Image (tube, rainbow, N blue to C red):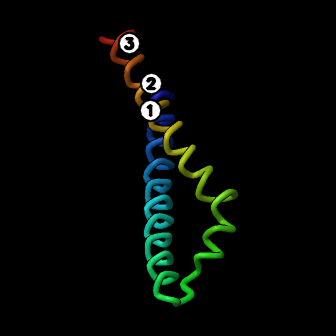
C-alpha cells in the first residue's frame, strides 16, 4: 500500500514539476515579449495564475513535504 501511494505521489509530483516549469517558461517569454511590445500571452497567463499555476505550486510543495514525511516515517518506524 505504501509503495503504491509513493509511486502515485511521485508520478503526480513529476507531472506537476513539468506544469510549473512550463508556467515559469511561459511567464518569462511573455514578460520579455511584453517589454518588447509583442503580445505573447501575458494577459492569459495572469488569468490562469489563480486557477492553475498557484495551486500547482502548492501541490508541488505539499507533495514534496508529504513524500519526505512518508519516507522519514518509513525509515524511522518500519525498518526491517
In primary-sequence order, the first of circles 1 and 3 is 1
Residue at horizontal 50%, vertical 54%?
16
> In the image, is 55 to the left or to the right of 80?
right
Distance CA(mark 3)–CA(mark 2):
11 Å
Residue 55 lies, in percent from the top left, at 62, 50
Question: What residue would you read off at disc 2?
Answer: 70
Task: State the residue in front, 21 or 14.
Answer: 21
Question: What residue would you read off at disc 3?
Answer: 78
Distance CA(mark 1)–CA(mark 2):
5 Å
Quadrant of the frame with the C terminus: top left
Distance CA(mark 1)–CA(mark 3):
15 Å
Residue 63 lies, in percent from the top left, at 50, 38
Q: Quadrant of residue 79?
A: top left
Question: What residue would you read off at disc 1?
Answer: 67
Looking at the image, do the residues carrying marks 1 and 2 touch, with CB atoms under 8 Å apart?
yes
Q: Residues within 10 Å of mark 3 (few under 14, many from 20)?
A: few
Residue 74 vs 63, above or below: the answer is above
Task: State the residue in front, 13 or 41.
Answer: 41
Residue 9 lies, in percent from the top left, at 49, 41
Looking at the image, do the residues carrying marks 1 and 3 touch, with CB atoms under 8 Å apart?
no
In primary-sequence order, the first of circles 3 and 2 is 2
Amino acid at each position: 500500500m505504501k509503495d503504491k501511494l509513493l509511486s502515485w505521489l511521485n508520478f503526480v509530483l513529476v507531472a506537476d514539476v513539468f506544469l510549473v516549469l512550463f508556467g515559469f517558461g511561459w511567464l518569462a517569454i511573455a514578460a520579455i515579449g511584453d517589454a518588447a511590445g509583442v503580445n505573447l500571452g501575458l494577459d492569459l497567463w495572469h488569468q490562469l495564475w489563480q486557477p492553475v499555476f498557484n495551486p500547482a505550486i502548492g501541490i508541488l510543495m505539499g507533495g514534496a513535504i508529504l513524500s519526505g514525511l512518508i519516507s522519514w516515517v518509513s525509515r524511522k518506524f518500519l525498518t526491517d
